[in-house]
Amino acid sequence: MDKQSYFHGTGRRKAAVAQVRLIPGKGEIIINGMPYEERFPRPEHRQAILKPLQVTETLTKYNAIVKVAGGGISGQDGAIAHGIARALVRANENFKPALRENGLLTRDPRVKERKKAGLRRARKAPQYTKR
């Protein structure tokens, strides 16, 4: 193995930030010290996390060690997928077109809109009363 023993990628989605390290291995994914199956019990979230590895056909070539903070479950799974995709590009530049084609390298810019003064939420106004 060369001088670098892992590949790093940072992923973001909504308020979540994931720091991903890819290490050559058998395909284990550890998120905040626990297996990803325990951390994300819903299959939709697991599928989203595995998508970059499936697209590049590297499901059994790398172990991923992830630190994720902020946001909720959906934001975190998107951040992890983004981080894994970025780390895969650092590992092998040839993966970039396939990941880009599947939209895995693009940072999703949608975040929660701030609350405005006089409104109940960002856009919900109090009920209008005529009299």
Image: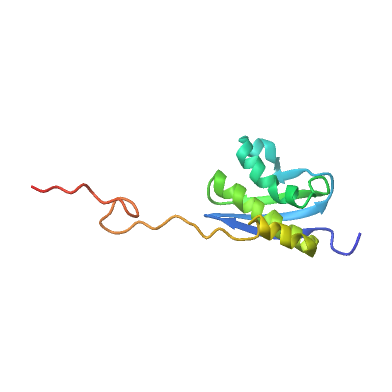
| Residue 32 in sight here | no
Q: Residue at x 66, y 42 (%)?
A: 47
Q: Residue at x 81, y 53 (%)?
A: 23
Counting from the top left corner in percent of width and height, residue 12 is at: 59, 57
Left or right: residue 127 compared with residue 105 = left
Residue 30 quadrant:
top right
| Residue 126 in sight here | yes
Counting from the top left corner in percent of width and height, residue 5 is at: 84, 59
Left or right: residue 59 compared with residue 43 = right
Q: Which color scheme did the rendering employ for the protein?
A: rainbow
Counting from the top left corner in percent of width and height, residue 19 is at: 67, 56
Q: Residue at x 66, y 41 (%)?
A: 46
Residue extending furthest toward the right = 1
- Quadrant the N terminus occupies: bottom right
Question: In terms of depth relative to the viewer, which is nearer, 9 or 43?
Answer: 43
Residue extending furthest toward the left = 131
Counting from the top left corner in percent of width and height, residue 124 is at: 30, 50
Q: Residue at x 63, y 36 (%)?
A: 43
Number of callouts? 0
